[in-house]
Amino acid sequence: MRAGGQDTTFSADVKVVNVLATVRNKQGQIIQNLNKDDFTLEEDARPQTISYFSRESNLPLTLGLLIDTSMSQRRVLGQERTASYRFLDQVLREDKDMAFVIHFDREVELLEDLTSSRKKLESALTSIETPQPQQRGGGGGGYPGSRGGGHRGGGTKLYDAVLLASDEIMKKQHGRKALIVLSDGVDNGSKVSLTSAIETAQRADTMVYSILFADEEGYGQRGGGFGGGGMGRRGGYPRSRYPQSRPDGKKILEQISKETGGGFFEVSKKLPVDQIYSRLEEELRNQYSLGYTPDKADPGFHKISLTVKQKGLIVQARDGYYAGR
């Protein structure tokens, strides 16, 4: 990683830890004029020296769009699709940035791999639809470890989607990396746990931005009775048994975003998805990049605390990283 912030690389033993941060005031406005000396950084409660600092707007950006297509989302899917394409069209610089599209319900499927082509991304978004209620099982069968066919169960695989996007795509990329999840946050079908999904995103140095798009009336016919396999074109995971009680999707999405350094947004009449995407675009273009060499190189998880000396400002950054394997 060069001090100018032009090239950031990560190695398995983490020589330099990079932290991307957004700073806001209490009114939610982004603060853009801070310097290195305005920040204080600690790892595992030990002060660290910030060796690299820049205000980032130019680093390559890799985006993953993860769209919940379960039955509970069927009425809001059109809004999600339209707003998502408009966002990608505005944010992606074809000479520098790339994006991919995944949809998840009873299966996790990669609709478009990493590309800078707006046309390919638009085509992928256009193809997104919710599963039909009469369909039972099958989706994605034939992948390693999957149970295709007519098995009931499966539900919505949010955690699997985050893990697969992080582990199979994002960890191979450099620069700034962010997943954008559009979902109600309710997972009732993943093989992996919420903790595992968050850990995998952290290991891939990937921020997760969550957009809570809930249609409460959609739960009357939620597609929780589907069987299913894994992620199309990239291998799969076996179906898991899951509790029938509905988890708190908002808390789940807030947790994923907080621990990975991303942001959480909730769609409402006062804050439609178009406005959320505008805020997200502003945030992705106005981040601080800080780098430091840890004073200890022990493997495992290390807690990061990044604050600013000026009172009344709120720092949004990941809360830790994993060193080694």
Image (cartoon, helix red, strand yellow):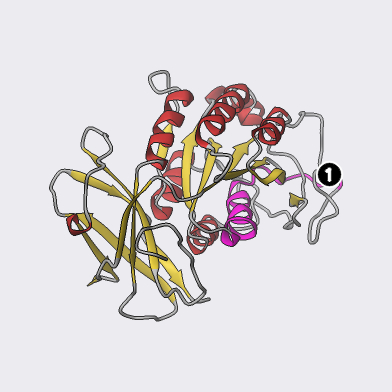
- Looking at this view, is 7 or 236 the one in front? 7
Q: In the rendered view, does 207 fall on the left or right side of 100? A: left
Q: Check disc 1 and report its element: helix, strand or loop.
A: loop
Residue located 83% across and 50% down the image: 141
Task: Please provide the residue range marked out in magenta.
Answer: 149-172
Residue 285: x and y in percent read 40, 41
Mark 1 Cα-neighbour bin, 10 Å: few <14, some 14–19, many ≥20: many
Quarter residue 50 falls in: bottom left
- Looking at this view, is 287 or 252 the one in front? 287
Residue located 44% across and 73% down the image: 14
Q: Which residue is mark 1?
A: 138
Quarter residue 6 falls in: bottom left
Query: Does residue 181 sit above or below 81 in this rendering?
Result: below
Q: In the rendered view, does 180 fall on the left or right side of 296? A: right
The verdict on residue 160 being magenta is yes
Residue located 50% across and 50% down the image: 60
- Looking at this view, is 199 or 99 the one in front? 99
The verdict on residue 14 being magenta is no
Residue 168: x and y in percent read 65, 58
Query: Does residue 265 sit above or below 251 in this rendering?
Result: above
Query: Does residue 98 sit above or below 214 in this rendering?
Result: below
Q: In the rendered view, does 60 fall on the left or right side of 150? A: left
- Looking at this view, is 86 or 51 the one in front? 51
Residue located 53% across and 26% down the image: 216
Quarter residue 26 falls in: top left
Residue 275: x and y in percent read 42, 25
Image label count = 1
Quadrant (top left/top right/bottom left/bottom right) for the N terminus: bottom left
Q: Amino acid under label 1?
A: Gly
